[in-house]
Amino acid sequence: MVRVFRSLVIIAGLFQMMMLGPSYGQTSDEGTLRAEMARLAGADFDGIADVVTSLASIGDPEAAPLLRALRGGDIYWRKSDRLVVRAEKIPGRLLRLFDPLTGETLEDVKKRTIKKVKVNNTLRRSIDTALGTLTLRSPDRATRLDAAGQVFRNRDPATLPALDAALVDEADAQIAGIMRDARAAILLNDATADPAETRSAIERMVARGDPAARNILAGLDTRDPTLAAAAQDGIAAIDRSLRLWGYAQNIWQGLSLGSVLLLAAIGLAITFGVMGVINMAHGELVMIGAYTTFAVQEVIRASAPGLFDMSLFIAAPLAFLVAGLVGICIERGVVRFLYGRPLETLLATWGVSLILQQAVRSIFGPNNREVGNPSFMSGAFELGGLTITWNRLWIILFALAVFVFLLFVMKRTMLGLQMRAVTQNRAMAANMGIRTGWVDAMTFGLGAGIAGLAGVALSQIDNVSPNLGQSYIVDSFMVVVFGGAGNLWGALAGAFTLGIANKFLEPFSGAVLAKVLVLIFIILFIQKRPRGLFALKGRAVEG
Amino acid sequence: MQQDAAVQEKGKIMWTGDLRASALAAALGMGLAMTAVPTQAQEDTIKVGVLHSLSGTMAISETTLKDAMLMLIEQQNAKGGLLGKMLEPVVVDPASDWPLFAEKARELIEGEGVAATFGCWTSVSRKSVLPVFEELNSILFYPVQYEGEESQRNVFYTGAAPNQQAIPAVDYLKDQGVERWVLAGTDYVYPRTTNKILEQYLKDSGVAAEDIMINYTPFGHSDWQTIVGDIKAFGSAGKKTAVVSTINGDANVPFYKELANQGIEATDIPVVAFSVGEEELAGLDTGPLVGHLAAWNYFMSADTEANDEFIEAWHAFTGDEDRVTNDPMEAHYIGFNMWIKAVEMAGTTDADAVIDAMIGVSVPNLTGGYSAMMPNHHITKPVLIGEIQDDGQFETVYETAGLVPGDAWSDFLPDSKPLISDWRLPMNCGNFNTETGKCGSAM
């Protein structure tokens, strides 16, 4: 019943718009808008949908700010006089009221005196359609681009006249392209469209070739068998190309998972791989890095919100230092007494990991902490049929940068030289005047600091909670053992191999089984090559 | 691994130092664990056990419930206690370790002599303590939504059964025109059972098998790229698609982040979750999640006087204006008040008398109605569907017309279909088989 009513309203709106025709987008009497807006006070979802439809059919861009605020859930009505307002939170648990159309400030009130105009998903969709229609001819390019995308997504036949009108004037090739796509999508949603036009619309969708286009073709409802066959062929063609892109997507996702594994493992490649210390607290050092990021963001939020996008650049060196210092404390306080006794080291560092977890839980609380993504790390872009999310791209680059940095420290600095000397022959190194204790502490600190850097990156994709580290410790050991202890290149190759293998297994076997299969593969591999992919050769091996 | 003489020598010499370090570590750890245990030990009090993990993976969810219980007990004491005695909370920490739950439960009942225990979160922890409560004949209040398929004489289930959460949520989405379903869950008993029920329910209502996609992920899964990609592809078949998520706790955050990053909005493919509440959203930027759904029996945004009072008391108790309230807290609120009422009616805290008095007890809930304890030890609740808002709260978009009674044995699983539960005499049975006419299922 409700649905019938709603479609009647939409049809009515459609007629109204057709009659308006070329005058579309002209301003209307402000009184009309205000009368519609007043109906929002106390309305239920159907009532609000009704207002949105008529605002769209009036076609006055002046209504756009109101609709935008309505979608954002910022529209309220005053209980005293049922005036519809836009409200913004201000300090002191108050709300500041504005006129939704003009933006004029009205007054500051307590939350109890106003009531929210609620929206749900269905309403959000119709608001998007209305906004898309209203802003198709906006002078601002970004708004127009957005509007065209919106019209494409909602493909409401009622928007066709406005779209045609906007298409005539559109000079920007990209926006015009999306508008033509939108036009095709709308025609395919309209069973009464002209068959010739429908055919060209199908061709346009096949040329577009993305999942959205496939979705539209699959939803085509037509009685014409040739059109239906064309749509089926189109779907088959899109599926073929999507499958190929699927492999590329798998490789990309594997690289991305590999980079996360690399970050988690590379610090361990130093402490376990080079020094031979089984450090069960490695995951907690990663966690400390993530909490440092959180703390930095909190300070920035409180004191200099403008710097928020820079927060990770500030957090990275700090996380390195904090985690590094904790690492040095662990080495000086526990590990150095246990060199050469792997079992005790394992137990002691496991204890340290529990202490660190509970300490963080006591200081920051057991709940997840919110670490925000800077704007350059949010969202995704399309590369052909690939969806590449910015945060994953940056993390891959970051992992490689950390790897190069570590390689540089190991091969080109005095510390790196001493590290290699001490781990290869401690007695000889000591005789040459190297302070082996100091080098041990620095090496462990370096590994811990790198773990802290990993924490900064992982805070962007995972929960920042006291349990963060636990989920990475097994994976890290897996990578180091597989790649070959004591070799940084081994860690790199190991991480990416395991990442890509995991991602190719996952679609067939499911995430749970993929993990199991990877583990079995490693066990078998270690039987064959006990020292991993890149085994160290020479005297250092015979300990 | 290389070991040379110098290092070994060094290790031996420093052995005593090492011992000292581990002793220090142990002392530190114990000190932290002890802080949660209240120290007052009054004579002649009624002891109430609180069995929630304060450390380990589940601490994130359960610590809040411990605080809520302490607040409820404090409030009751301010009102004069119970049967003329003060209530004394006994808090223990089972540390997210399932066998430890059973040990701690025994310690509470045998060692401390608690009159009732409020606790557990995961089903496996509940299953682990069940035999203890049965053997020692004590009472457990379990506050979390769960998979059902259980009714035990010593346990009162104040969280939602599947028919009080999952099925109404699916009904709502069907009403919104959804025709294709992704059932995504973490790989353990609650999602598996719930999804089995939902799959049968959807098929019964005419959804084709190819329109249902079921996917399980390990605990704490953090790499959601493939699965979100799959959902996107599954959603491009020309029918409106929704995700029904039984993904547990922590794994939700990266899941939602990935959804947002890959540009899946609630207006395209809505996700309805059964394990995401205000507490989980607190660790998340909710801007990109607006419109995704959750089904619960309580939202912090419930516009009632009782709820306002509860929130105010909670903020005062915790001293933090930003602390949120959530559904399992309301379940404890209901369960605790039911227990108080039943003890008052029975005039004693004796387990058998209280268990009998509990059935039929009705107390106000926080959403403006009354919840009653039913003979199957589950309660009646309203079901709310809420949409996530950008302030981390839920806006109720749908509410069942009346209260929904919790169904212990699902009608959509062949094995449990003939089973009913009634703890009143003469049946006095948690799994009575209506086909064989006997107590005890032949499962």
Image (spheres, rainbow, N blue to C red):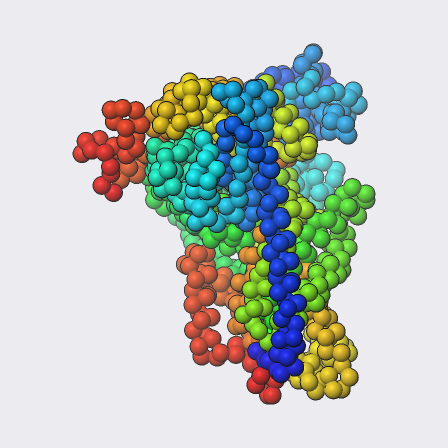
Q: Quadrant of the C terminus of chain A?
A: bottom right
Q: Which residue is located at x 46 percent, y 42 percent?
A: B107
Residue at far front of view = B43
- Looking at this view, is A12 or A161 the one in front? A12
Q: Which residue is located at x 46 percent, y 56 percent?
A: A511
- Looking at this view, is A119 or B373 the one in front? B373
Can the viewer see residue A109 in this picture?
yes
What x and y, as percent, mark residue A403?
Answer: 67, 69
Q: Which residue is located at x 63 percent, y 75 percent?
A: B11
Q: Which residue is located at x 56 percent, y 68 percent?
A: A344
Q: Quadrant of the N terminus of chain A?
A: top left
Q: Is residue A56 above or below residue B27?
A: above
Can the viewer see residue A493 in this picture?
no
Position of B192 compared to A161: left or right? left
What x and y, as percent, mark residue A3?
Answer: 46, 24
Please identify the quarter of the rendering in which residue A401 is found: bottom right
What x and y, as percent, mark residue A466?
Answer: 61, 50
Q: Is residue B395 above or below residue B104?
A: above
- Looking at this view, is B358 or B343 the one in front? B343
Q: Is residue A414 above or below residue A460?
A: below
What x and y, as percent, mark residue B163?
Answer: 39, 32
Residue at far left of view = B436
Position of A373 compared to A156: left or right? right
